[in-house]
Image: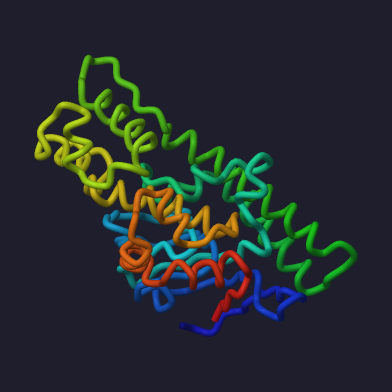
Amino acid sequence: MTNQTIFTLVNKQNGNLAFKLFSFEDNSYFDHLQRNNYYSLIWVKEGSGKLKTDFAEYNFGQNSLFSFSPYQPFMFLSTLIKGIAIYFHSDFFCIHKHQTEVTCNGVMFNNIYQQPFFLVNEKLQTTFETAVDQIKTEIQNPGLAQYELLISYMKILLIAASRLKTEQQPQTIQTSNGNKEPFIVQILKETIEKDFKTKHSASQYAKSLNISPNALAKITKNHFNKTLTALISERIIIEAKRELYLTNKPIKEIAYELGYDDEFYFSRFFKKNTDISPQVYRETVGFGKAELN
C-alpha cells in the first residue's frame, strides 16, 4: 500500500485500535480477500472495477460507497481507484446499540438482499467530506468529550448514507405490470425470515413456495445475484453473529436455536462462511479484541 496519512483512535481500556481513517491512491490494500473484524466504509471517489463479496460479484464505478460488516469477505479487482476508508470496531460504535438512532443495520450493514454499495450524490459527498475533515481534526487535537464528538460525526455520516441508499435501493420490490416474479421474490424473503432457523436447504423453500427448485434458483439469481443457498446461509450467519455479540449464550445453545443439533457441525458451517470459529468471532468482535493492522 502506498504511504498515506492514517488517523487512528486507540481503545484506552485494552490498548487496541478502535477506529481508523485513511485515504488510498490505488487498489493495493484491497486486492486480496478481506475478512476484517470491524465495520468498513469505503468510498471509491475515482476509478472503477469489480467487487467480489460473499457469493456474488458486482461491477462498480466512481463515487461508490461500500459498507461491510465484521468478517464479511470482500476484495476489489481494479487498479486505478482513489478514495477514503473508515474502519470502526463495535466497541467504538455498535450499530446494534445505536440502531434506534441511526437505523443503518439492515440498510448499510447486514442486508442479504441488497448489493453492499450505492452511488454517492453531491449532498452525501459534502456530508462525507465534512465529517472526515472534522474527524481528522478531532483525532489530531483531542479535546473534552472526544469520544462523544466522534460518535456524533459517525451518526451524521451513517444516517445520511442510510437515507440515500434507501432512496436508491427500495427494499420492497414493486410491480405494476402484473409480473409474478417480484411477488414470488417478496414471499421468498418473508419465508426465509420466518423459517431460516428450521429450514436450511433450497429445496425446502421451493416446496414451501410450490415452485420447482430450478425455477426458484433462476429467479433468486436474477433478483439477488446470489444462489438461494447463499441467501439462507447468510441469514443464518447474521443471526449467529448477533447472538454471539449481544448475548452470553453458550455456542451450543445458539446452534440449537438456529436449528443445529450438533454444535460442531454448526461451528464448521460458521467457519466455512466466515473463516473463523464462533468462539473467535465472539472474542474479537463481541469482547473487543480487535486488531486493526
Q: Front-most of 195 and 9?
A: 195
Q: Is residue 132 above or below residue 108?
A: below
Q: How is the image coloured?
A: rainbow
**Position in image of residue 94 (x %, y %):** 64, 56
**Position in image of residue 235 (x %, y %):** 38, 48
Q: Front-most of 272 and 88?
A: 272
Q: Quadrant of residue 208?
A: top left
| Residue 1 visible in rendering | yes
**Position in image of residue 126 (x %, y %):** 63, 50
For image coordinates 71% across by 76% down, the residue present is 10
| Residue 49 visible in rendering | no
Q: Front-most of 218 and 158?
A: 218
**Residue sitting at the far front:** 261
Please state the total of marks drawn on the protein image.
Answer: 0
Say left or right for 76 vs 150: left
For image coordinates 23% across by 15% down, the residue present is 177
Q: Front-most of 211 and 153?
A: 211
**Position in image of residue 149 (x %, y %):** 79, 57
**Residue sitting at the far right:** 144
Quadrant location of the C terminus?
Answer: bottom right
Q: Is residue 85 above or below residue 5?
A: above
Q: Is residue 182 above or below residue 155?
A: above
Q: Is residue 222 above or below residue 209?
A: below
Say left or right for 205 vs 237: left
Say left or right for 128 vs 30: right
For image coordinates 90% across by 65% down, the residue present is 144
